[in-house]
Amino acid sequence: MALVDKNTLDDGGFRMSEATARDFIELLKPRVMSLVVFTAFVGLVAAPVSINPFIAVVAILAIAIGAGASGALNMWYDADIDAVMTRTASRPVPSGRVLPGEALVFGLILSALSVMTLGVLVNWLSAALLAFTIFFYAVIYTMWLKRSTPQNIVIGGAAGAFPPMIGWAAATGSVSLESVILFLIIFLWTPPHFWALALFKSQDYGRAGIPMMPNVAGEASTRKQIFAYSLLLAPVGMLPWAFGFTTAGYGVVATALGIGFIWYAWKVLVMPDSDRVMKPAKALFAYSLLYLFVIFAAYLADSVVERTLTSGVWA
Amino acid sequence: MIENELVTLTDKQKKARRSRSIAIGLGLAVLVIIFYVSTIIKFGPAILDRAL
């Protein structure tokens, strides 16, 4: 008699996975990951400590995988609301390409792997910050704040703001004022960025029952808050120059970018209630992406050029 | 009589499994290389300092 007499598998709650590697890569939210990689890279390279290039690549890779893992956990937990929003309905879990359990295990394994790799090969402070970021995004933001308060992306924005600080910590083994300012720039950038999106996608969020600011406080209040955050973001963007961490070159770029941000936010503020196309909100959303990319690129360029000049390479 | 009915994968499932297997293989290979090279770097020149 065989140990297993009958080994029948049917479709009753079980099916073989048809998920391809591409579906799992999609779980990592590659577009969000690219922003994380870029800002972490800036933090790591701008830090005034040289780090072995290979270890630097490992650090960036670990941070990217950690960010991706939190994205996978987010997609596992949010599959129900992703399914009813047009922007997210085709994601791997709601579309049925990846099973929820697969996404959960994938996210958990990659979280552990990225944190341990960063700790063992780089340093444990950056690993601890990465672990906290994953926890903050997956548990505090996704499981708690997102569905319970219109301040969800204000507080949850901290998760997206940590990468440059982690990059800085990977290079220096510490957290300093420079990295806190880089954190603050992304932290204050997040509300106007997402609320601009929420304005022209409010029906989507409303259908999913997510308490985004336009659905809870109304569009007029959201437009005012976008403008208020823009007024905060612009001077904070100039802080690295004000504190003497960068040259005037960065200061000029940051000032111009800040004025641009306030201008686009102003256009959103005065947008008529009857405007359903919401071109100003779409323009602010697009500009906010450009803003973040350019201000971090300027910070990176400034610190690299400054270091090159002071090291006497050109002397 | 022993009934031994096993799952027969469809072509789509076989293709997906192959794609996942390749990705896992590549991922593990990259991980091995990362840990190998990083260990050499962390040891530095001290890797040659050993009692004979």
Image: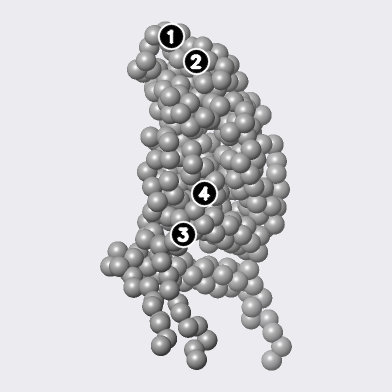
Q: Is residue B48 above or below residue A111?
A: below
Sequence-first disc among 3 and 4: 3
Secondary structure at badge 3 equals loop
Q: Which mark is residue A219?
A: 2
- Which residue is at 52% across, 30% downward? A209
| Amino acid found under the numbered disc labelled 4 | Trp
Q: Amino acid at mark 2?
A: Glu
Residue tagged by mark 4? A76
First reached walking from the N terminus: tag 2 or tag 1: 2
Toward which corner of the image does residue A147 lie, by quadrant? Answer: top right
Viewer can see residue A34: no
Residue B22 % position (x, y): 38, 69
Dot label at residue A67: none
Q: Could you tell me which chain the residue with mark 2 belongs to?
A: A
Judging depth in this view, the residue of A259 and A131 nearest the camera is A131
The disc, 3 or 1, on the residue closer to the chain's N-terminal end is 3
Element at label 1:
loop
